[in-house]
Image (cartoon, grey):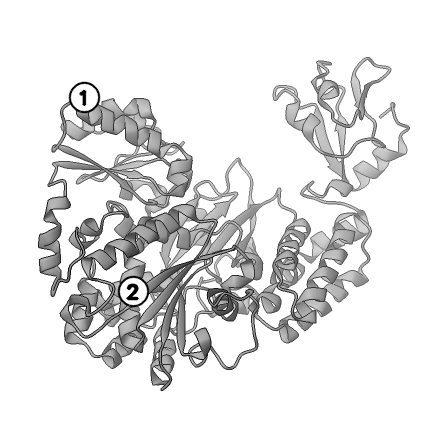
Amino acid sequence: MKARKFNSLKDLKTAGKGNQNGSSSRVISLSAASCGQASGALEVASAFELAIKELGLEGKVQLKLTGCHGFCQLEPDIIIFPEKYFYPQVKAEDAKRILLETGVNGRFIPELGFQDEITPNGISRLEEVPFYQDQLRWLIDQQLDLDPLSLEDYLEHGGFEALESVLSKLSPQEVIGEIMASGLRGRGGAGFSTGLKWKLAREVAAQPKYIVCNGDEGDPGAYMDRGILESNPYSVLEGMLIGGYAVGATKGFIYVRQEYPLAIERLDKAISLLYQAGLLGEKILGNDFSFELELVRGAGAFVSGEETALVASIEGRRANPRQRPPFPVVSGLWGKPTVINNVETWANIPLIIKNGAAWFSKTGTDKSKGTKIFSLVGQVKYSGLIEVPLGISLNEIINKIGGGARSGKKIKAVQIGGPSGGCLPAELFNLRVDYESLPAAGAIMGSGGLIALDEDTCLVNLALYFLKFARDESCGQCAPCRIGTQQMVTILEKITKGQGELADLDLLEKIGLTMQQASLCGLGRTAPNPVLTALRYFRHEFVEHIVEKKCEALVCPDLISYVIDEDKCSGCLLCLNSCPYGAIEVGSSGLPQINLSSCEACGLCSSICPEEFQAIKKISGKDRQQTQLIPDGMN
């Protein structure tokens, strides 16, 4: 499409008709976002393209490389429209068979469908798969058959109709009123009213004004924003255009961390195509509204997700937070009014405009409206990106959508909200997931990271992991965060080594509460949350580490030992030959034994022991102390 101006979407769609492949009787949608590509989606795509040519199916079957379908652990997957047949973990060698059986004849192949112990014969359709049930996928469902690189495809799916409606029918104040009435709150973690933020920025007299999309997603295990940016970038860009019109901004920035190369690549192309189509630049769709958009690549500092640090980074300075007020809506980029919302927030804007505030606000709770995307990971049976109505319980997420614990274990906790979130026990799984209930329990929703933890997780060790992350990512400006995180790390390291004292627990709480009250920005104020909630709900694990020198989960290296059960040992000597520390020797019985004084508890011997014997086990607490009393070579 050559660069030109269009006065309506109708004209734009007509001009783009020549770029489309035409209608096909069936569309094969192949998940090809980062997770799909990492699982072999591009190789599968090549196999389908070759088979379509060999079988002469051009024009009859269309292959679409789409974004994330949500069920990431089963990628690459395909969905065949219009039936919505679902095939998980597709292999290149399956391409021809799927094309002949399903693509041409519409017959489902049961043995290639989704199977588990409950449904061994294979589930055929997407909505029947347990993972997809109990979700409400307003945003993710848009990605199922959408080519993220095609502006024409987005337009055919109703794209930019919300923008055209806004520019032709609504005043900026009416747009803001609609967003306020919807009850949409920022999906980046703070949960501030989106409409109120826009209203405050518009009321500031200073010019120019700016719009920013915060795509600096840094929580470990979280990839909600990446999923949207790779799968449906135009929805975010359309939301920003609507926001720019409402606020009175003429320029926007979309800030994405450099570690998201595919998201950056697709955004870069999408922005370029919007300029070519006249949907960015001067007099958009023949109206007086003009808007420029710039993609900014972040260096990957976690603190850049804090809005004042984000402002500094866009301006070319070090990403250091500053005191607020003034807030960015009053004084942001270059001292001018700036509206900052995250990726998911912007993606919701076109939906609200098209369907109405009343439609959006019907879902959720009194104060938390709409849906929320979470990355459900950890020790659950089914993992991936999920979209659920706010107000759903943790139990429904973990045990229904996630399928409960895998490998016969028991889920004992969930860590929600990333490094700034909290660890909640299974006893609280009836808790509603919304902006009020989670903070009352000591956690936060954050941007949407959700990690299920089973019995093999040590909460002390996990708290240490998150504190180390916060310490390493701290900008170091303020003493409460800079010194407090290091002090907490030092104490937790003592405890995980069996050197802690009960008085350390009170000290951890004192430091954590001080950080919450005195730190400069949200990173420092929320960094203690994983420790404070772990102490609140799992204090017994800390006490065990201190008093009994025991790690019940058998995770902390300084509190565990590996021993060989001679009754189970076959004498194969695989462990002896593999030990990197030379800590295994042949004892008087002729079987290998572990010299505890040399053992570094790396666990290699246990992992290499043949499964049919399982002769090497981990011990902790009293069992370990008794074993250490036996002279080396006799244990």
Label 1 Cα crowd, 10 Å radius (few <14 / some 14-19 / many 20+):
few
Q: Residue at x 13, y 50 (%)?
A: 16
Label 2 Cα crowd, 10 Å radius (few <14 / some 14-19 / many 20+):
many
Where residue 336 appears, as percent x and y from the top left, is 42, 79
Kind of residue at disc 1: Glu
363 left or right, relative to 525? left
Kind of residue at disc 2: Gly
Where residue 215 appears, as percent x and y from the top left, is 42, 59
Q: Secondary structure at mark 1?
A: helix
Asked if residue 188 is positioned above or below residue 46 in the image, the reply reads below
Image quadrant where residue 480 sits: bottom right
Asked if residue 256 is positioned above or below residue 606 in the image, the reply reads below
155 left or right, relative to 398? left
Q: Residue at x 81, y 52 (%)?
A: 547
Q: Is residue 371 visible?
A: no
- 44 or 466, nearer to the observer: 44
Badge 1 vs badge 2, beta-carbon distance below 8 Å: no
Q: Find the distance from the CA under tag 1 to the CA under tag 2.
A: 42 Å
Q: Which residue is mark 2?
A: 239
Q: Secondary structure at mark 2?
A: helix
Image quadrant where residue 289 sits: bottom left
Which label sits on residue 54? 1
Question: Number of marks in the image?
Answer: 2
Where residue 1 appears, as percent x and y from the top left, is 17, 50
301 left or right, relative to 45? right
Image quarter in which the C terminus is found: top right
Where residue 291 appears, as percent x and y from the top left, is 27, 69
- 243 or 559, nearer to the observer: 243
Asked if residue 399 is positioned above or below residue 177 in the image, the reply reads above
